Image (cartoon, rainbow, N blue to C red):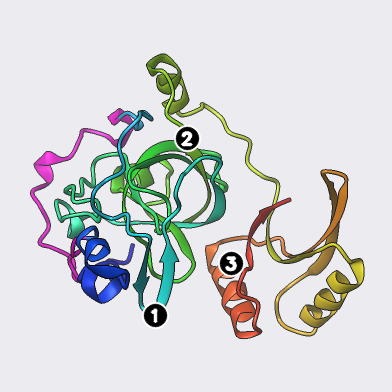
Amino acid sequence: MKLTRALALPCCALVVCGVAACSSAPPRPTAPQPQPPLETAPATAASVPDAVPRIEPRSRNGNPPFYDVLGKRYFVLSSSVGYVERGVASWYGPGFHKAQTSSGEPYDMYGMTAAHKTLPLPAYARVTNLQNGRSVVVRINDRGPFVGNRIIDLSYTAASKLDMLRNGTAMVEVRSLDAAPQTDAQAAAESPAAVPVPGSLFIQAGAFSDPKNAERLAEKLRTGEYGKVFVRDNEIAGRRMYRVRIGPVPDVAEFDRIVAALEQAGIHDAHLALD
């Protein structure tokens, strides 16, 4: 895991939306902090229960309308309802333990928390490792990650339960969870024993209603070193869509390579897709 993620510049350098917005996003440490005593660690990550979705007010900190990091602007969502995203997860640990998060809470590497760029703080989400089917529920209380194409930064414990500590990254699905009555929330927070693992993972480079446009992009990509390129058509709500796919993609390293190449080719909205 890399501790050099760009997360924590003073808010007034990041948020360009007035004094009120600036005060809502507290500074974050620019470098890893000294490692805390490890006696605070739980016996095993498996002994730490998943987060339980509950109704909470939006944090006074970390929820500006938008903020800028490393030349890119991020717009905070007004709600987490119905949010689903697939991509690469990373994790952050000892160097940031007990440091202040964007919501103002201390970061607990042994808790079931996460950082996300645009979901409101706090929010709850189920994160599923698409490579092994493991799933956890986390409470999102921080901003980030701002490195590469990562979509979520997990706590040490959450990453451990997903079995991604060794590799440092994993291809995941992030699905928001709504707060529910306590009994339902507890049931929702239980990690399923087995989640179906997709047969293959692909990169979607574009989606079109006109098959000619899809084939035009596919032909362009076939001249590059992207791997197998094909067009898949699906009918959605009575409308046929033609999706340009690349893959299958075997691992995060290849995903990163292809996405970076697509960026260089001017395709900026490529994302992870299931088979």
Position of residue 266 measured from the top left corner of the image (x, y, whole percent): 64, 82
Residue range in magenta is 26-48
Residue 154 is covered by the magenta coloring: no
In this view of the protein, which residue sits in the foreground, 178 or 36?
Answer: 178
Tell me which residue sits at (38%, 17%) in the image.
182
Tell me which residue sits at (34%, 48%) in the image.
114
In this view of the protein, which residue sits in the foreground, 70 or 76?
Answer: 76
The residue that disc 1 covers is 71
Q: How far is mark 1 from mark 2, CA to CA?
A: 31 Å
Tell which circle, 1 or 2, labels the residue nearer the N-terminal end: 1
Q: Amino acid at mark 3?
A: Phe
Q: Is residue 157 above or below residue 77?
A: above
Q: Secondary structure at mark 2?
A: strand
Tell me which residue sits at (8%, 48%) in the image.
37
Circles 3 and 1: CB atoms closer than 8 Å: no
The answer to whether residue 135 is left or right of residue 111 is right
Q: Nearer the viewer, mark 3 or mark 1?
A: 1
Determine which of the numbered discs, if any, sits on residue 255 in the image: 3
Q: How many other residues sit within 10 Å of disc 3, few (<14), some (14-19) or many (≥20)?
A: many
Tell which circle, 3 or 1, labels the residue nearer the N-terminal end: 1
